Image (tube, grey):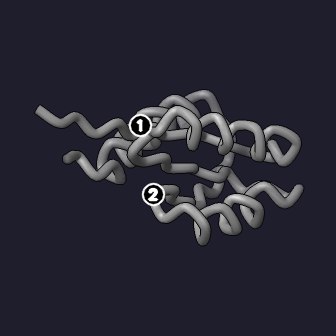
Amino acid sequence: MSVTISVNVLVHNKIKHVDAFVRNMIDACIDEVIFWDGGSSDGTYERLLEYKVKYPYLRVLHWEQPERSEYKQGFNEVARRNLMIEASSMD
């Protein structure tokens, strides 16, 4: 029986850590890695797009952070998890 491993990663302004993390995912032979960028302004999103060209099993999605409030934050955590599950290939 074959199992597909899909990893969802939330990122926001993590340019200093992106290269090492992507290398770790490649070395670990993960089948699918989905990066959810929360509106980075430091080049994180653009760097991930560069990796996506080289490694087609990497997916890069943009997640804009809505207004912050305790209610909205809790709702958005649930919505984000649901989106992550839906985005996975589910093989």
Q: Which of 45 and 77 is in front in this view?
A: 45
- Rendered view: 6 above or below 34: above
Query: Label 1 crowding class (10 Å Cα cut-off): few <14, some 14-19, many 20+?
Result: few
- Rendered view: 82 above or below 28: below
Instruction: Check contact, mark 1 vs mark 2: CB within 8 A.
Output: no
- Rendered view: 56 above or below 58: below
Element class at badge 2 = loop
Amino acid type, residue under disc 2 in the picture: Tyr
Instruction: Tell me the residue at 88%/56% (across/down).
Output: 42
Query: Label 2 crowding class (10 Å Cα cut-off): few <14, some 14-19, many 20+?
Result: some
Q: Residue furthest bottom?
A: 53
x and y percentages locating residue 62 in the rendered image: 59, 61
Amino acid type, residue under disc 1 in the picture: Arg
Q: Nearer the viewer, residue 46 or 79?
A: 46
Q: Nearer the viewer, mark 1 or mark 2?
A: 2
Q: Distance between the residues labelled 1 and 2?
A: 20 Å
Q: Which of 51 and 11 is in front in this view?
A: 51
Instruction: Tell me the residue at 59%/55% (across/down).
Output: 63
Instruction: Tell me the residue at 35%/36% (across/down).
Output: 5
Task: Give whichever of discs 1 and 2 has the lower sequence position.
Answer: 2
x and y percentages locating residue 33 in the rendered image: 49, 46
Q: Which residue lies furthest to the left in this view?
A: 1
x and y percentages locating residue 86 in the rendered image: 30, 50
x and y percentages locating residue 54 in the rendered image: 60, 67
Q: Quadrant of residue 71?
A: top right
Element class at badge 1 = helix
Instruction: Tell me the residue at 28%/52% (across/down).
Output: 89
* Residue designated by label 2: 57
Q: In this view, does 75 lie to the left or right of 18?
A: left
* Residue designated by label 1: 81
Q: Is residue 4 left or right of residue 43?
A: left
